[in-house]
Amino acid sequence: MIPRYSRPEMVAIWSPETKFRIWYEIEAHACDAMAKMGTIPQANADAVWKAKDVEFDVARIDEIEAVTKHDVIAFLTHLAEHVGSDEARFVHQGMTSSDVLDTCLNVQLVRASDILIEDLKGLMAALKKRALEHKDTVRVGRSHGIHAEPTTMGLTFARFYAEMDRNLTRLQAAREEISTGAISGAIGTFANVDPAVEEHVCKKLGLKPEPISTQVIPRDRHAMFFSVLGVIASSMENIVIEIRHMQRTEVLEGAEFFSMGQKGSSAMPHKKNPILTENLTGLARLVRMTVIPAMENVALWHERDISHSSVERTIAPDATITLNFALKRLTGVIEKMLIFPENMLDNMNKFPGLVMSQRVLLALTQAGVSREDAYSMVQRNALKVWEHRVDFQEELLADKDVVAALGEDGIKQKFNMDYHTKHVDTIFARVFGG
């Protein structure tokens, strides 16, 4: 991912230096296990640890790979340059390249998951704070983009919190799904490396042994992982689409913070554009873009091929780096977001009283009017509000059929805004705990 959408901590996980360090640890721990079992001399295993403080030379490894055309062999050759050829002769004993590559990839994905989990928790904290702040801030709810019935801004933030809470559970499960390693040798039969070696290496790296691998760790695990990242990205877009809508000039119920000196347009000085949330919509597309290739990686020829390799070298860093950046950016947007309660009430009253139509409809049916007649009575008055911006309550009070069914006081009672917010506390207790 380009530096513009990257954060150093996540980028470091995918650096060549980090990758080679993990490769080294896999090989060194494997040597320890083999020496303990008597497969290789203890002195050779100890010698491998002479490189524990070495900064592996990426350029040198690339130079060797240019000749060998094999990245793991290039690394092992470079390792032997530090350890000594004779001392290093038992490194990679009985192992195959995928033992190193796949186990390393999962270590990186676990580390990336840990960062993303903290990112999600940070976003949830911001959403909860704004939800509590605006629990009783009334705004109109919309379906199909059209005024529906009243809700509160706090409920809007609360439902986004609940969605991200579900995503946190999914991501924790995805981390568990990807937390496996394989040191099973060619074709995964352990013919040339004892299963105890795998158990030792995985324990040292914080992984679980893959129950059954071929020459690779099964890619359904990775498909699940990237699918979860795609769902999180979609949930982020769900939030930012709402913010973008709220910032529209004719709505203006909320907006991104606009800093001193910020410019919205090179042509129109008056503009305050929702650039951060528009950017986040685009970044969500990039994360989701990795899901289908991850799904397609599941089906490999026989015990392995490498059709998945080039895909994962790209999507693993890109998806995690992008999502890390996006979650941090969205958290900042939520924390600094401007809310305009007065505009919310102005918008609701653009068609005075119209949002109470269902309550009047229900009252008429409870008063003995058939649902069909009640709907017709309410709609004919509601359409006048749409067309002429008259007051809905006044129209109902002038309708002799409605008055006959409900009485004037009965009509007026149906325009109490508190009716629509009476269960907010109940919903908040469900979302945030009692």
Image: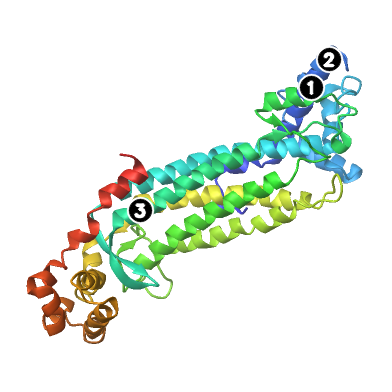
| Mark sitting on residue 196 | 1
Q: For this rendering, which residue is in front, 201 or 18?
A: 201
Mark 3 surroundings within 10 Å by alpha-carbon count, few (fewer than 14), some (14 through 19), many (20 or more):
many
Q: Are marks 2 and 1 in contact (CB under 8 Å)?
A: yes
Residue of label 2: 37
Q: Secondary structure at mark 3?
A: helix
Quadrant in which residue 291 is drawn: bottom right
Tell me the crowding category of disc 1: few under 14, some 14 to 19, or many 20 or more residues within 10 angstroms, Cα based. Answer: some
Pointer 3: what residue?
Answer: 157
Q: Is residue 100 left or right of residue 252?
A: right
| Of pointers 2 and 3, the one earlier in the residue sequence | 2
Where residue 331 sits: x, y (%)? 42, 49
Which residue shows up at 54% across the image and 62% down it? Answer: 282
- CA gap, disc 2 and disc 3: 57 Å
Q: Give left or right: position of 202 versus 421.
A: right
* Position in image of residue 384 (x %, y %): 22, 85
Amino acid type of the residue that numbered disc 1 sits on in the rendered structure: Ala
Instruction: Give how far apart the Cα atoms at labels 3 and 1 are.
Output: 50 Å
Visual colour scheme: rainbow
Mark linked to residue 390: none
Q: What residue lies at 25% left-to-right and 81% top-to-bottom?
A: 373
User: Is residue 144 toward the left or the right of residue 202 in the image?
Assistant: left
Task: Say what amino acid the circle numbered 2 marks.
Answer: Met
Query: Which of pointers 3 and 1 lies earlier in the amino acid sequence?
Result: 3
Residue 399 seen in render: no
Instruction: Tell me how many marks there are.
Output: 3
Is residue 9 placed above or below 281 in the rendered structure?
above
